[in-house]
Every structure is written in structure tokens, then in C-alpha cells.
Image: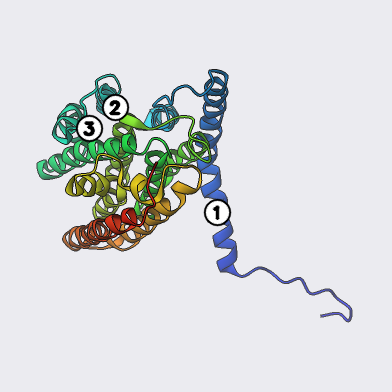
Amino acid sequence: MQPGAEVVQQPPAGSLAAMRILLRTLETMAGGVMASLVIVTASAAAILAAGRRAQPPITAVIPVLVYVILIRRRIDAAFVVGLVLLAVPLFIDVGNSLLARVAIGVPGAAVIGFGTTPGPVLLDLAVTGAIAVGGALAADTADAHERIGLGTLFLILATIGGWLDIPDVDRVLILLGASLPVAALVWPIPLARAGAGAYLWVGALLWTAVEDGAIRLSSVVGTTAALGMLLIEPLVRRSLGWQDGVFLRTWGDRPPLAAIAPSAVQAAVVLLASRVAGLQRSTEVSLVLAAAILAVAFAGLRTAAPRLARGGVRPE
């Protein structure tokens, strides 16, 4: 080396790889983010112009619509038909009956489960059941917490869980990108809600997990378990005999602070479901771990909720 020559340090190979992955991730998400952002901005303007008199159930519809448009060359017709059928609950009020909520989601879930998954029949049945039951519970949770937008926030976190454990991330990143802007419709001020649109989001997320995670079915299990509090809250609420949402009774109904603690709880369940249950080599082990994670979360919420509510932290 010549005297006075400048030494140029090259970044470590690991850093270069991480930068490439980050750039690839951002590039894949960009289309979904931009398309969703345009729709979210227009929707927020329309809602504010109307005086925020109602919270339209659009926060789950927007990302799924963007998702279908952006991946239209990589979807089965049965998936689209299934989503159309899963939109039926948006127009039919089935009340508070979980059984009715599940039943109304079965046709769309079955079209997706039996019309798009690679089989065997047991997998078709599992996907159908996961979408119908998961969609029903998610919609119930969303309806019970529309005042603080928790349904939408929980669904976004569940989608992050899918990104963390699905082997082929291209499609789930598009869905995640389309999902992120809708957070602005529910936090810090709830302008819209997910409502029965949760069926659509759950259907799109679990279909993606099966399509891009078939080489490691534990990722499908992990993604399903990453729905977390969306699955657990209605069961805890009914076991306690409460009419109000569990998180409303325990953390209050004044946004934006009321959504922070429940979202942190959901994030913890998502992380465990996706990075522990969702990365196992054995599907059977994954199922056991996912069941254990959800059972512990149920027990924890079931135990803590009455104590917090008795402490006076509840909606007025």
C-alpha cells in the first residue's frame, strides 16, 4: 500500500445481506402501502366530511381488496369466489350468537378450503374450519371493541405474525403493506372499523399461509394461532358472562391510550405463535405448542380481567 493511501472499509457481508433483505422487503410492500394509502386517505376525508357520525366497516375490506388486485395473476378463481361469500356477513346481522357467526362463514371458507388448497382432505377441512371459526371470532372481537379500533389493530399484528413464519413472504408482504395504512383509520381516533370484514381478512391471511407455507405446514398453524386475542377474547367474555368487550372492561374505552396495552398483549401472543409454533419442523409439535400458547393466553386473560375490572378501570 502506498504511503498516504486511503483505506476504504467495506461493510461486513452480513450487513450487506441484511440491507438487501430490507430493501427487498420494502420494495415488495411498497405497492400495497401506496394503493391502500390512497384509499385510506379518501375514506378518512369522506368520513370526516360526514362528521364521523358512523364508523363504516371498511378497515378489513380495504387491504383485502388491494391485495386481490395486486396479486390477481397468482390467485385461484375459487379464492375470489370464497372472499365474495365471506363478504356476506357484512350485509347480514346474526346478532351475538357465535354459532350463527361461524355458520354464515362456512360457505366462503369451504370454497377456499376445498377449492384452493393442495389437499389432502384433512387439510381442506382444517383450512375451512380455521377460516370459518377464526373469522367468526375475529368479527365478534372487532364488533365488541369498535370504540377503540382493536379489531383492526389485532388483525394487522396477526398479519405481521404471518410474515414472521410463512416461508415464501412475497404475497404476505403485499397483504401486510396494504394493511398498515388502515391503522390510521382506527388510531389515534377511530374513524372506521373492521366489523364483519374480519372474515375477509382472516380468509386472505390463512389462504396466503397455505399457498406459501405448504412446504412447512407449521407456518399455517403459527399464522392461525397468531390471530391470538381475536380468537380468545370472545371465549373469555362469554365465560365471564360479560356483555362489554373484555378489553373495554379492563382498559377503558377512551382512545388512543385504551388500545395500547391490549395491542401489546396481542403482539406478545403473535410473537410466540409465529416464532415458536410457526417455525417447528413437525406439524404435530407445532399444533401442541400453538394450543399451549393460546391456552395460557386464555387463562391469563380470564384470570386478570375480573381483577382489573374490579379495580375500577372500565368504561363509564
| Residue at 89% in and 78% down | 4
- In the rendered image, residue 166, in percent from the top left (x then y), is placed at 35, 51
Residue 169 visible, this angle = yes
- In the rendered image, residue 192, in percent from the top left (x then y), is placed at 45, 29
Q: Which amino acid, mark 3?
A: Ile
Decide which of tag 1 and tag 3 comes sooner along the chain. Answer: 1
Decide which of tag 3 and tag 2 comes sooner along the chain. Answer: 2
Most extreme residue toward the right is: 4
Write down the residue under mark 1: 22
Against 294, residue 120 (above or below) is: above
Q: Is residue 267 left or right of residue 123?
A: right
Q: Residues within 10 Å of mark 2 (few under 14, many from 20)?
A: many
Q: Are marks 3 and 2 in contact (CB under 8 Å)?
A: yes
| Residue at 22% in and 62% down | 289
Decide which of tag 1 and tag 2 comes sooner along the chain. Answer: 1
- What element does badge 3 sit on? helix
Quarter of the figure that contains the C terminus: top left
Write down the residue under mark 3: 112
Write down the residue under mark 2: 83
Residue 227 visible, this angle = no
Q: Which amino acid, mark 2?
A: Leu
Separation of marks 1 and 2 at Cα, in angstroms: 31 Å
Q: Which amino acid, mark 1?
A: Leu
- What element does badge 1 sit on? helix
